Image (cartoon, grey):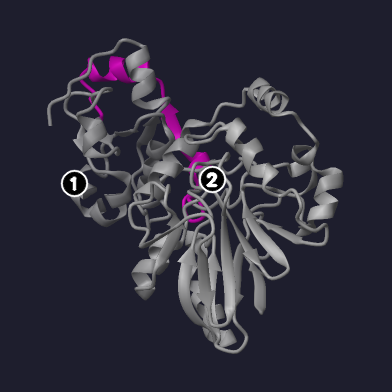
Amino acid sequence: MFFEQLNEGSCCKTYLVADEASRDALLVDPVLERVDHYLGELERQGLSLEYILDTHAHADHISGGAALRDRTGLPYVMHRNAPCRCADVRVDEGDVLPLGKLEIRVLHTPGHTQDSMTLFLPDRMLTGDFLFLGEGGAGRTDLPGGDPGEHWDSLQKLKGLPDDLLIFPAHDYHGRSHSTLGEERRTNQRLRPWPREAYVAWLDSLKLGPAEWMKEVLQANYACATDPRAVWIPVDAPTCEVRGTAESVNVQLVQTIAPQALSDQLASMATPMILDVRELAEFVGELGHIRGARLIPVGQLSARLNELDPLKDHEIVTICKSGGRSATAAAILTIAGFPRVHSLDGGMLAWNAAHLPVTRDE
């Protein structure tokens, strides 16, 4: 078996697995920003990519799965419960992916997400976010589709497996590459002999609450985003590829404007141009939009900058649901030479909370 852990220096782990004889290969949990590197590595190793696979829908970075599918035309594999609309092959517990003479067995391990799965190889397992290393524990269970009880149930599937089984997770934030199941049984709090009720109560008591930007990353992955600027990810977040969407755009330099301050400007003679960077369904949806706003979804903004050239010296305020995508949009505009750009602090959620006027007309 050929096995390589990719993304050196990153806390986000991608795996290249292949059959030595046939050279048939599988990429597991690819990251969008490194797609070109993966394709180069396949060529360098003389491997023939057969499948692209995500162990679950990711909430902390944009997957490279959709982009690789588009570039190669090869099957994109996810669990049958995955909300991702472009997955070609849907698998479930007990299914086997053949790679030459190598067989990769699927174990459904929900809890972090409904579609989480673990892959079994001859002497190791790729656990995704189902199980991390040591004090890392496991992926959070408070994201959409997460469930502490289901995570406990999934952990029970590890009983009876040998201590020398190697564990390769999708993330590690302490520079480690792998562990063994025996070591995790000794050091990982999730593998203590918890009663189910106590385990659920413990996780519920943490009350972490997912950040709004993580929900937006999930939505981008559900929609098979292939633009690294499709959603904003904070550069100081303790998650893998935290610079993924800010690599070429310094979102930390974006200036913001409070909802009431923007409302006051709109009532004055110095009216800024309002650029809403959500999707159309959001624009006309529950939160509505500011009257006179122009709609250009953030994923289209780079390709449509020429439409805004006549407004280059005008003040522009970018707006989204909560402030994440609008910060990305404001940074894109700033880098493109628009000197007077602000992002609405808190987005339409904050605008509505301040009881400021909206419309829902297209």
Query: Magenta part of the protein: which range?
Result: 245-272
- Please give the count of numbered marks on the rendered protein: 2
Q: Amino acid at mark 1?
A: Pro
Q: Secondary structure at mark 2?
A: loop
**Residue at numbered disc 1:** 310
Vertical relation: 156 (above or below) 12: above
Number of residues whose C-alpha sits closer than 10 Å to that of mark 1, classed few (under 14), some (14–19) or many (20 or more) = few
Q: Is residue 37 visible?
A: no
Residue at left offset 60%, top offset 73%: 17
Image location of residue 172, percent across then percent down: 70, 52
- Tell me the distance, in whole angstroms, between the alpha carbons under discs 2 and 1: 36 Å
Is residue 352 found left or right of 247 in the rendered image?
left
Magenta span contains residue 278: no
In primary-sequence order, the first of circles 2 and 1 is 2
Q: Quadrant of the C terminus?
A: top left
Tag 2–tag 1 contact (CB < 8 Å): no
Image location of residue 310, percent across then percent down: 19, 46
Q: Which mark is residue 60?
A: 2
Residue at left offset 46%, top offset 76%: 50
Is residue 279 found left or right of 194 in the rendered image?
left
Using the image as rendered, state which of residue 217 and residue 23 is in the foreground: 23
Number of residues whose C-alpha sits closer than 10 Å to that of mark 2, classed few (under 14), some (14–19) or many (20 or more) = many
Vertical relation: 353 (above or below) 169: above
Picture quadrant where residue 286 is located: top left
Is residue 188 found left or right of 73 in the rendered image?
right
Using the image as rendered, state which of residue 293 and residue 49 is in the foreground: 49
Vertical relation: 319 (above or below) 332: above
